[in-house]
Image (cartoon, helix red, strand yellow):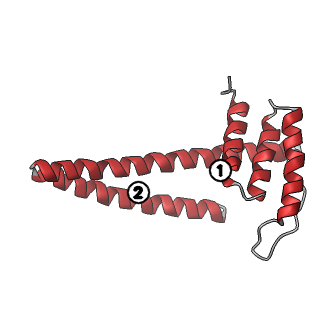
Amino acid sequence: MTRARTVVVALVVLLAMYLTLVGYQAVLLIRAGGLIPVTLGLAILVLPLIGAYVVWREIQFGAATTRLSSELVGRGRWPTEELPLRPSGRPERLAADALFAERQAEVDAAPADWAAWYRLGMAYDDAGDRKRARAALRYAIALHDGHTG
């Protein structure tokens, strides 16, 4: 198991334990009866459910991006460019911006190519734009799985 996967598994186990304890406390409040304890118990019970949903969505996203990256590697379409790095370990901004322009041109030339969108998502990440990176990766997943209309 890779280090990242081990960390994710450990965090999910810890979160499950936490959500179980919070859920148990919520049930105790609901069992206590009374308007305020029951209302508080129900409110507390909703939080673990929301947390579990968010974790599930992130795990699905991670699994899908891993699946697509493996397919890119298998097809020989994994990006091989090595960007110069800053002392922080992040790519140098000008080099990342230049690569981003290339990736955007690939998407403009083939807007239905999931691999181009995946590579664009990686370029967004290199440029420091995580929100757009995740959006591009989600779109690549949707294109790959045939969920775009």
Q: Amino acid at mark 1?
A: Lys
Q: How far apart, in angstroms, are the residues tagged by discs 1 and 2?
A: 27 Å
- Residue at the location (40% across, 47% down)? 50
Give the residue at x 53% y 59%. 9
Which quadrant holds residue 142? top right
Q: Can you identify the residue that label 2 sits on?
A: 16
| Crowdedness near tag 1: few (<14), some (14–19) or many (≥20) residues, C-alpha within 10 Å | few
Q: Position of residue 111 (x, y in %)?
A: 81, 31
Element type where label 2 sits in the image:
helix
Looking at the image, residue 146 lies above or below residue 7? above
Q: Nearer the viewer, mark 1 or mark 2?
A: 1
Rendering coords of residue 74 (x, y %): 84, 44
17 and 95: which is toward the camera: 95
- Closer to the camera in the image, 131 or 13: 131
Tell me the SS state at disc 1: helix
Q: Quadrant of the N terminus?
A: bottom right
Residue 11 at x, y = what percent?
Answer: 50, 62
Q: Earlier in the sequence, mark 1 or mark 2?
A: 2
Q: Which residue is mark 1?
A: 131
